[in-house]
Image (spheres, rainbow, N blue to C red):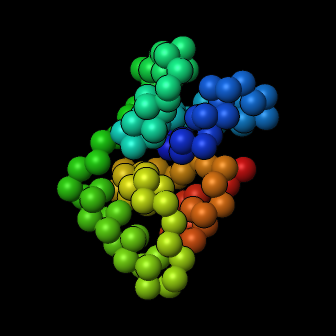
Amino acid sequence: MVCLDTSILIDYLNGNEGIIRIVKSYLEREKLSTTSITEYELLKHPDETKREEAQEFLLTIKVYNLDQEAAKKSSQIYRDLKMRGKPINENDILIAGIAMTNKESILTRDPDFKHIEESNRIIVV
């Protein structure tokens, strides 16, 4: 499975044709997932229609939650980034920790993910 980051899902739901093609190409080969962090980010949108569209899409894919193992992995990623002077958004750290704990690659548009040590599992488009 491939875990979709918030940046990918926002562009997908906004009709970005390039991202739609990429997501569909992954969907042809494997199942898709995301995280409860991304779910939170999408569902806090002020526009009710956007929230409903997001909710409908989220029902079609696996949504991983932040559990103890993912929290430990996320804290490890945080400490490593801090030590190397490469801090990134906390939500992105949680998304990475959840995805990596579940042995998922991450599909994102956010190049900050490349600072994570296990960047071989991160696909930036």
Please determine whether, in this image, residue 84 is positioned above or below residue 99: below
Residue placed at 50% from the left, 26% from the top?
46
The answer to whether one can see residue 75 in this image is yes
Residue 38 % position (x, y)? 45, 40
The residue most toward the right is 18
Viewer-closest of 66 and 40: 40
Residue placed at 53% from the left, 21% from the top?
47
Q: Is residue 56 left or right of residue 113?
A: left
The answer to whether one can see residue 29 in this image is no
Count of numbered marks: 0
Q: In this view, does 29 lie to the left or right of 2?
A: right
Q: Is residue 11 left or right of residue 50?
A: right
Residue 42 % position (x, y)? 48, 32
Residue 15 % position (x, y)? 72, 24
Residue placed at 58% from the left, 35% from the top?
9
The residue most toward the front is 46
Please determine whether, in this image, residue 24 is positioned above or below residue 120: above
The residue most toward the left is 68
Viewer-closest of 52 and 124: 52
Please determine whether, in this image, residue 36 is positioned above or below residue 86: above
Q: In which quarter of the image is residue 68?
A: bottom left
